[in-house]
Amino acid sequence: KEESQKEFEESNSIKNDGKNSSEKKNNMKEIYEKMKKILEKLQKEIEQLEFSLKNINEKKIEYKKELLYYYVDQISDNKEKSEEEITIIDRFDKKINQLKEKTVDASYEELEKFNCESYVSKAKKSQQKINELIQEVDVLKEEATRATMENEVDSIQIKVSEKLIDAIKEKSIIDNASNEIQSIEKLLMLHNFSSIMDNVRRNFQKAKEEEEIIKEKFAESEKIKKEILVDFQKAEELRDSLIEKLDENSINTHIEEIRSINDIFATKIVSVNELLTIAEQYNGNCKLYHHSIERGKHKIEYLKIHDYNEEKKITDDVIEEINRYVKESGNYSNEADKFAIEARKNYELSCIYKEKMSDLLDESLLLGEKIKVEIKKNDVTDMLIEIKDGYYDIKNILEKLVRKLNKLKEKDVSIKEQDKEMAENKKSMDAFGLITVIKKNSDNFLAEIETLKQKASNILDNSESAFESTSTKNETNEEDISNKLKIMEDNLKNVLEALKKMESNKQILCTESSRIKEIENRVNSMESEIEIYEKSYEEGILEEIKRLADKEKASFELLIKSIKLKIDNTITILEELNLEHNNIAHKFEDTKIKLNEIFDIFDKSYKNIERFASHISESTTTYIDIKEKREKAKIEKENIEKQKEEMEKLINIINN
């Protein structure tokens, strides 16, 4: 870009300097060739950049697909682990039933408190849901494999990530059920009061710790949720401000900021989901510890009734302590449940805003493309106006040049027969030759101007055709955002192609304008030169008239002197011969008078010619002035010739 700007400035410098036309033309041609090469180089770089961007987008889509496949693998992994856990549940369920059968002295109500059927049923329902999720994600995986657009992959990725969350949730239910069942089995195996109390106390401490962790994770999710709301508001402001942006760079910057927020949303939602997963896991643990404490209480109550060895150890204080553990662990469990519910609300709200953010990004992309199209269409309109202005400027200049050249061509500079003798002097002949060259050059320039007029007209026609081709398709009938974006991208591509053509046309018009400027300068020079040559032509004739007049004057003066001498000698001879000479002398005196009259007229004409010729040396004298003086000098020369004829008649009279 900098290189082409440098060449453009150099080209303007050459157009404005005083170098001769030939050298200037060569320099302009050289710069034009350089600029042509630069434009070709830029075009290659643009194509390479487009190729690179295409590769980047392909890699980005490929990465997103890999992430999506990873989510699918995670769901499969959860399925395998859940199946393993179900096997463990079945084993412990069987073991619990065997233990219950061996506890013959326990009532149905007492044994019912150690029932695990609901946990087994819940776990198997979750396992069934995980199997269904696997089938659903396999379909989504195939769709993702076929997808070519980034937003398609993004949409599928969101669905798969939701399935993963559901799979993790169901796996957590299975894990909690397994832990509950194993806890039941452990208590059924314990028969020592002290061991049971130690177990209760440990579970109580763990329930408290789990509740604190859940509270902590909820606070973190609350913080991220608030950040998401703030980020979304910022994204809305960025989208709304797109309308005010008047340049493509600002639009791209805002779109990238919105895209960045969208990417951050994905990361933050993963974090909120992780916090929710941890919260629900610890909530399940907290419930487990509370349930274990309740079952511990039931086991102690059972021992107090059925085991006489342990009965004495189970005092009222012990029962009170256990009841306190049950109550407080219940409070911990309830609080943990509340925090887990709130954490899930935060996650669900975040997911809603992720959808909103995704829609907002799509809206922004679409709006950005629309605005870019309008900006470029305005650029095309402005470019067409510039080309039209340039065309009409060229047209006016060419019409003016045609008038000037026709005027030069019509110059009536020819050697007339009556002026042939006087025009055949070096100065006039040289001027005549140069004038003839100018007239011939006028024909050449007129022919070139016709070509330039046609070129300029073609450029205007091509530019108007390019402008007409910028009509855009309407995307409102499309429902799919990717199709809408594709339409707008095609519209932008169409307008950019038209703009590129018009920029090329403008460059060609500038080149033609430079050539026209050269012709204009040359025609202006020709106008000045032809006036100089016309003046020089007339000066040559005037100088020749003066030269011939000088020659005639010298001859005339010599002749008059000779005639006067002859008259004087004749009178002297007559006087010496004492002849009657009065009449003859009188006649000679009349002849002398007539001779003087002829000379006076001759001399007057000569002096006029001399005066006319003196104007040649004056720098302010124009061609019109010299032509006028030459025409008057010609009349005076004719008068001199007339007086010469009168003189010849007079000589004949004297001789006779």
Image (cartoon, rainbow, N blue to C red):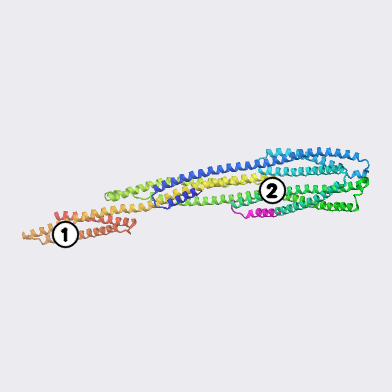
Q: Is residue 546 visible?
A: yes
CA neighbours of label 1 inside 10 A, class few (<14), some (14 to 19), many (20+): some
Closest to the observer: 509 or 307? 307
- Residue occupied by mark 2: 267
Of pointers 2 and 1, the one earlier in the residue sequence: 2
Residue at 84%, 39% (x, y): give it: 92
Q: Where does residue 184 sit, x and y in percent of width and height? A: 85, 43
Q: Is residue 656 visible?
A: no
Q: CA distance from mark 2 to mark 1?
A: 132 Å
Q: Where does residue 81 sit, x and y in percent of width and height? A: 77, 39
- Residue occupied by mark 1: 591
- Identity, as a three-letter code, of the amino acid under mark 2: Thr
Asked if residue 233 lies in the magenta stretch, the reply is yes
Q: Horizontally, is 80 left or right of 18 in the view?
A: right
Q: Horizontally, is 20 left or right of 357 in the view?
A: left
CA neighbours of label 2 inside 10 A, class few (<14), some (14 to 19), many (20+): few
Closest to the observer: 592 or 626? 626
Residue farthest left in this picture: 577
Secondary-structure class at tag 2: helix
- Is residue 101 depicted above or below 375 in this figure? above
Q: Nearer the viewer, mark 2 or mark 1?
A: 2
Could you tell me if the residues under marks 2 and 1 are in contact, i.e. CB atoms within 8 Å? no
Asked if residue 543 lies in the magenta stretch, the reply is no
Q: Quadrant of the C terminus?
A: bottom left
